[in-house]
Amino acid sequence: MGTIHQVSPDRSPQPPDGTSPRPKRYRPGWGDLLGTLAVFSTVAPVGLWLLNHGLPLPLGMKSTVGMLGLLSSLIATQLMLLLVVLLARIPWVERAWGHDRLARQHRWIGFASFWFMMAHLVAQTLERVSRDWSAAWQRTYELYVVEPWMLAATVGTVLIIGVMVTSMRWARRRLRFEGWHLLHLYTYLGLILILPHMLVTGPEFHAQWARAYLWTEYVLAAACILVFRLGLPLYRTLYHRLRVEEVSTEAPGVVSITLTGRRLDRLHARSGQFFIWRFMDGPGWTRGHPYALSAAPQHDRLRISVRESGDGSARAATLRPGTRALIEGPYGTMTARRRRRPKMLLLAAGIGITPLRALLEDTRYGPGEATLIYRFSSEDDQLFTAELRELVTRRGVDLVLLPGGRGPDGSWLPADFGAQPDEIPVLRHAVSDLTCRDVYVCGPPPWASAVHATLRRAGVREEDIHTEVFAW
């Protein structure tokens, strides 16, 4: 049997733990291969350009500007194609890198492609108008409107720039996710409109093999979207036939939804993962929301738990039995497959308890080898109270409760611990062998970041910390 205790600020820490042998770093071997291919696909256009033209020596002002304009265009296009592939939700890519990491890379690559595109526009405009400064407006008009396929390319470029602008933080804060996501889809249309002018006017693609290379990239990117973003979710939805069986209240503003389906074991879902869910309950059902499994997946049942935080999540409490569910996933790498050690520490805050509660249900460990530190605001907000007590009794989980109001900025401890709490002793009191464990963290991003920082200061290796943001 495990233990349940509540930590208070006056608890004294235990002595620090010893060191442990360096574990093997987790990552599927082909994850690095995928990264190498991504880099190659980005720099390949530079090779195409050099093969066709070589360096225009001696370098003059006009030749340099023209060269930079062409190269920046090629790199921008390659980065945008890479963006499409990154978030096509290809299963083996997701397993290699993790959904939230792919989402972060998507953001940085997106802005890089934006600035390369802007460099292309500036360089091409300068190169054209420098031929006759007195007719600058006419030259610009001819470049972007009159020349073959340039009007389509101009429209495509405007669409992509619009998507990039709405992806900036100040714009994202003013847009609902659903509206921003719809605007984001115009990236695909923009790429389609840009392609013809590259094939017709781009000298680096006049060679037959170069055209074949570009067409292959476009076809593969489109195939990834059609197969993995549309086809696979549709097939899984139709095959597994998920329907709502029961909606139960866990706490004020939090419900658990149990769904039944056909041969759910073939989803190969694991505790700690999440799906993108769409419930066919009326207008607005097309908006997807990421919810983690809150119980270990079974062959005929799945359970998720949802906290009310917006229009979509508020509707979850009104779902009726029999409502059909459309799914994308499973996604996420915060599973037992990441483990490298026999013992584990889990830290959860708020609704972040859901995937960790599922992990504790079906992950292998002995009595005393799993410790859960659970942070919540008040007794009314505590979730899965009876289920966690059962895990303590049946599986030998050590449960540490941290109730209380929000602490100072930068701290993951409750306000009762003071304005500048010493967080490392709290961790060492819960687990004396802190650096000898796998550590799973799930909660609001600022809280999870604070926990991560404390763990690193305490000597926990980066590869032993497992966390994930359930991104769209």
Image (tube, grey):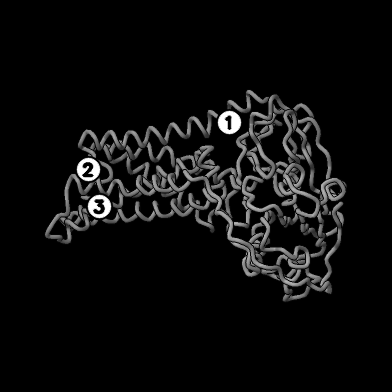
Q: Earlier in the sequence, mark 3 or mark 1?
A: 3
Position of residue 429 measured from the top left corner of the image (x, y, whole percent): 78, 67
Residue annotated with mark 1: 233
Residue annotated with mark 3: 124
Residue annotated with mark 2: 204
Residue type indicated by callout 3: Gln
The C terminus lies in quadrant? top right
Residue at position x 30%, y 49% in the image: 73
Question: Viewer-proximal residue, 130 or 81?
Answer: 81
Within 10 angstroms of label 2, few (less than 14), some, or many (20 or more) residues? many
Whole-angstrom CA distance, mark 3 to mark 1, is 42 Å
Mark 3 vs mark 2, foreground winner is 2
Q: Is residue 322 above or below residue 433?
A: above
Q: Residue 314: name its quadrant.
A: top right
Total numbered labels placed on residues in the image = 3
Question: Viewer-proximal residue, 145 or 412?
Answer: 412
Q: Is residue 275 above or below residue 251?
A: above
Residue type indicated by callout 2: Glu
